[in-house]
Amino acid sequence: MSGESAVLRFDDVSLYFGDTPALVHVSFEMGAGETRVVLGASGSGKTMLLKTALGLVKPDSGRIYLFGQDISGLKESDLFDIRSKVGVLFQEGGLFDSMTIGENVAYPLLNQRALYKDRRQPANGNVEERVREALRFVELEQTLDKVPSELSGGMRRRVGIARAVVTEPPLVLYDSPTAGLDPITANTIIALILKERDSRNTATIMVTHRYQDGHLMANFRYNPNSGQIEAAPRNGGDSRVKTKFFVMNGGRLVFAGTQSELRASQDPYVRKFVK
Amino acid sequence: MDNIGVGSLPIVMLIGLFSGLIMGQQMARALRAYGAQGQIGPIVSITLIRELGPVLVALLVAGRNASGIASELGSMKVTEQIDAMRALGTDPIQKLVTPRLIATSFTLPLLTVIADFLGLIGGYLIANYEFDIRFSQFWTPAWQILEYNDVVQGLVKPFSFAIIVALVGCFYGMRTSGGTEGVGRATTKAVVVSSIWIFIVTYFIGKIFVNL
Ligand SMILES: Nc1ncnc2c1ncn2[C@@H]1O[C@H](COP(=O)(O)OP(=O)(O)O)[C@@H](O)[C@H]1O
Ligand SMILES: [Mg+2]
């Protein structure tokens, strides 16, 4: 894969907050439709990996290519167009609590300039319809007129997913989507992420502290015919090949490889994330 | 709306009235020693409109609204709503800072005028009740003493303070980090820093107008 065709490429990226390392010489690339599962202790730089990828935080050194475009030196106003190709679910949710669920999900449709020419007419279909569709996707259509504080933590995550995918971006970033949720709700969230990934072949980066989440991402897939999550076929199922694991420690990418390589790792830090 | 000072109206009126009452009381005693009770109107008027009204109201609004703005924007920051705005194609400065700046620049001068007016009423009540000064004996000189310079100063100050309150509140709100604790720190910082700037700026504006 050449750097040009990669969805996302980090080239020797470093970021420090004072003396605290957030990213240290991070390099990797991923192609369209691929999955990355990012594991690592709290404070190891997982969130900053996603925020620098979006240009929300500027690295101190190194280059970041998003859809082949070098975003390292771009002005904020120039970043808006390219960000419209990336969906993001923030760790803290990032839902606007002064707006209804419907307004939250409509926000990217109404504000991302690259998506439409006339403010009232997004590229395909009308806003209301697409908001309902995205909320139906996460099975929360009935919450359209509620505000975020009226929903449970798991429901808010699902709304966050709806908002991240409503514009049908080719790359979606999920920051700790299962953190703080009970195991059942957590699995529902992962099922939604699989459904999004496999029904539209979306490139996906998922930060998590649960090895289980990564295992599901690597070995399961959404079957559009049955509408169910099922085990990927053993003989080279797509998700198995296209899913790689990253392990971060103190801002460094200390492991990058497949699930079996991860399981075989002798590094004591890496081993902590394998159960 | 409360964030921009509308909710401060009752307390601003109360503070305005009482500062007039207190000033009248203190001044009149001193003035009596020189047999100059009649000067109470001009003195209350000048002190209030030039300095006391703008500063008292601004400190109050700093306490209520620099903190309100900082905590509102601070919670948006720590829950990543500000990041979300940027990720979804909007500029938080334009969406969050500009409207607060405009609204505060409008309400703070208005609140100051109201406080000044009630302060004068307070001064008149004391003058009338304790020293038997009649309506026109108070209001005519109180009005005549005011020069163009005083009135402009009395409006330039609250306008500048409004900019301080809104910008300092937004600044500390937008750079909040460290969860809910961080929001508390940002709030306190916004009040302290904007209050300090109010005093510094009022000194320099005063200096400019004295030299004019
Ligand atoms: N705004 C900030 N100010 C100072 N340090 C920060 C800030 N954001 C993140 N950091 C530091 O950068 C490092 C990586 O943070 P982060 O990417 O959020 O970690 P995590 O892996 O838990 O998501 C941590 O040491 C964190 O303390
Ligand atoms: Mg994080």
Image (tube, coloured by chain):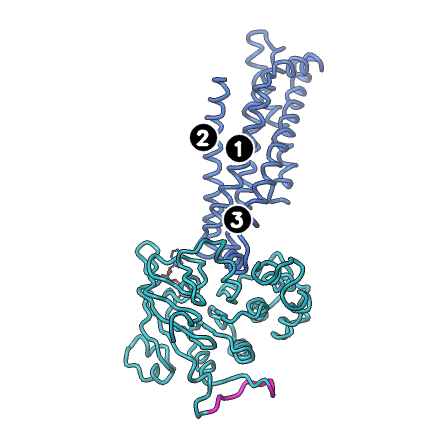
Chain colours: A cyan, B blue
* Observer-nearest of A274 and A75: A75
Above or below A130: residue B46: above
**Residue kind at label 2, given as amino acid type:** Ile
Residue B93: which numbered mark, if any? 3
* Distance between the alpha carbons at the discs numbered 3 and 2: 26 Å
Pointer 2 and pointer 1: residues touching (CB < 8 Å)? Answer: no
**Picture coordinates of residue A202 (x, y %)?**
51, 75
**Which residue position is annotated with label 2?**
B200
Pointer 3 and pointer 2: residues touching (CB < 8 Å)? Answer: no
Q: Is residue A229 magenta?
A: yes
Asked which secondary structure carries label 3, the reply is helix
Residue that appears at 57% across and 17% down:
B27
Residue A46: which numbered mark, if any? none
| Chain of the residue displaying label 1 | B
Rendered-image quarter of ligand 1: bottom left
Sequence-first disc among 1 and 3:
3
Residue that appears at 58% across and 16% down:
B43
Most extreme residue toward the top, as rendered? B35
Q: 10 Å neighbourhood of mark 3: few (<14), some, or many (≥20)?
A: few
Asked which secondary structure carries label 2, the reply is helix
Residue B160: which numbered mark, if any? 1
**Picture coordinates of residue A112 (x, y %)?**
57, 60
* Distance between the alpha carbons at the discs numbered 1 and 3: 19 Å
Q: Given this view, does label 3 or label 2 mark the residue nearer the observer?
A: 3
| Chain of the residue displaying label 3 | B
**Residue kind at label 1, given as amino acid type:** Ser
Quadrant housing residue A253: bottom left
Q: Given this view, does label 2 or label 1 mark the residue nearer the observer?
A: 1
